[in-house]
């Protein structure tokens, strides 16, 4: 693989730190580290920023003047896409799906949505269950009709272009670990639209790194999540010249911690958010990293990581906490 063959706009703060979490690790009885992809630097940062370096690279190479993307109301992907557009002088059109059904004023107007408005995007809300790919195409058509040149970014930036950001993260992590003589036994991440997980799988496969990756699902059931990740990992591996190297067995998603559904917070998530905050001053998010830590805590207590050094990929999203004040505050009182 040779990532410099792909157009890339540079704006992420890289490499992100790889740090120990001694107090959280002690609470769970494991040797726990964190890869700080919440610190990628773009308007609050998060995992979408790595993907957007390659997506913006392609958009600029194609001469686009408007980014078009979609997400749930409190989407971190949408926030980072608008920021990337602003930095490059591109307008951004977004469609926000009211996926959780919440009409609470903090959910609909604070957190990521407030930042989206601050950065000046054009926002359209649609009800839960809307065909979002159709909406993306409709918005792109409106841009074309007014003489603009749209560049459509799928939800989560999860296609083979976006996944290159996590191929690069896989390389970055191994370089860091080797430089510190730090043996990694397991990498744990939240997995949603699949680009992060698939990019890591493809990157490890290309580099012949056999560190197992455990993805904690936030939405789809296990079979569908693993299939989405596997298909995107295959396509990404092909893109980087590593076709045939991705093994189906390498794709493991644990979707037992989704709870009531995407973006819905339960006591286990709140306990995970509070434990990370109170042991390490580490802010996770209610939709992805908090749900993944809920899974990691439970699995650690069941002995799944016995004797292992575990790296937790912090994918960002703490800005979304402010969209969940009405849910979090009573549970923390
Ligand atoms: C989007 C997102 C994820 C999931 O990443 P995917 O590439 O969509 O699977 C995890 N954590 C946060 C904070 C996110 O915003």
Image: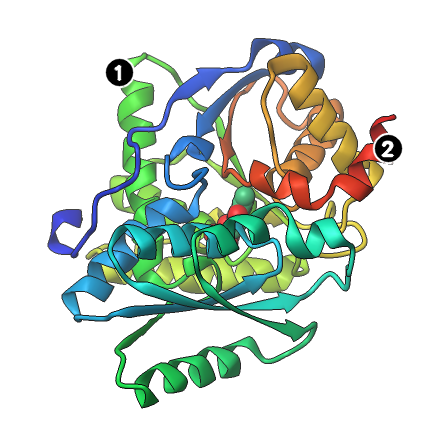
Ranked by sequence position, the earlier of labels 1 and 2 is 1
Disc 2 element? helix
Q: Residues within 10 Å of mark 1 (few under 14, many from 20)?
A: few
Q: Going 21% across and 44% down the picture, which residue do you hit?
A: 10
Is the residue indicated by label 1 positioned so its CB lies within 8 Å of ligand 1? Answer: no
Query: Which-is-in-front pick, marks 1 and 2?
Result: 2
x and y percentages locating residue 256 in the rendered image: 74, 48
Q: Please state if 103 lies on the left or on the right of 112 as rendered.
A: right
Q: Is residue 263 visible?
A: no
x and y percentages locating residue 131 in the rendered image: 59, 80
Is residue 111 shown above or below 211? Answer: below
Q: How is the image coloured?
A: rainbow
Q: Which residue is mark 2?
A: 331
Q: Please state if 50 lies on the left or on the right of 113 as rendered.
A: left
> Which of 104 and 54 lies nearest the eye of the viewer?
104
> Which of 187 and 242 lies nearest the eye of the viewer?
187
Residue at the bottom extreme of this rendering = 145
Q: CA distance from mark 1 to mark 2?
A: 42 Å
Q: Which residue is mark 1?
A: 179
Is residue 41 shown above or below 7? Answer: above
Residue at the left extreme of this rendering = 5
Q: Going 69% across and 65% down the picture, which residue do you hit?
A: 99
Q: Is residue 106 visible?
A: yes
x and y percentages locating residue 241 in the rendered image: 19, 57
Quarter of image, res 54: bottom left
> Which of 209 and 175 lies nearest the eye of the viewer?
175
């Amino acid at each position: 693989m040779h990532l410099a063959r792909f157009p890339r706009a540079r704006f992420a703060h890289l490499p992100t730190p790889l740090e120990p979490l001694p107090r959280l690790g002690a609470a769970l009885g494991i040797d726990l580290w964190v890869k700080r992809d919440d610190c990628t630097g773009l308007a609050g940062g998060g995992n979408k920023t790595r993907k957007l370096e390659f997506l913006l690279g392609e958009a600029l190479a194609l001469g686009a003047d408007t980014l078009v993307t979609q997400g749930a109301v409190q989407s971190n992907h949408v926030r980072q896409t608008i920021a990337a557009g602003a930095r490059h002088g591109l307008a951004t059109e977004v469609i926000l799906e009211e996926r959780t059904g919440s009409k609470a004023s903090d959910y609909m107007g604070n957190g990521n949505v407030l930042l989206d408005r601050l950065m000046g995007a054009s926002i359209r809300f649609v009800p839960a269950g809307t065909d979002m790919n159709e909406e993306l195409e409709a918005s792109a058509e409106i841009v074309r009709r007014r003489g603009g040149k749209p560049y459509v970014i799928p939800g989560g930036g999860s296609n083979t272009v976006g996944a290159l950001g996590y191929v690069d993260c896989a390389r970055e992590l191994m370089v860091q670990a080797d430089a510190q003589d730090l043996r990694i036994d397991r990498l744990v991440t939240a997995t949603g639209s699949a680009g992060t997980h698939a990019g890591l799988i493809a990157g490890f496969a290309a580099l012949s790194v056999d560190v197992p990756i455990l993805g904690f699902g936030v939405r789809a059931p296990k079979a569908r999540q693993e299939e989405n990740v596997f298909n995107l990992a295959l396509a990404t591996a092909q893109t980087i010249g590593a076709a045939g190297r991705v093994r189906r067995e390498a794709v493991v998603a644990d979707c037992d911690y989704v709870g009531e559904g995407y973006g819905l917070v339960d006591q286990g998530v709140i306990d995970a958010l509070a434990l990370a905050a109170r042991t390490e001053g580490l802010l996770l998010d209610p939709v992805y990293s908090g749900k993944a830590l809920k899974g990691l805590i439970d699995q650690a207590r069941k002995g799944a990581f016995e004797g292992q050094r575990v790296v937790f990929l912090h994918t960002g999203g703490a800005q979304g906490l402010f969209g969940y004040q009405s849910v979090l505050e009573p549970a923390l009182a």
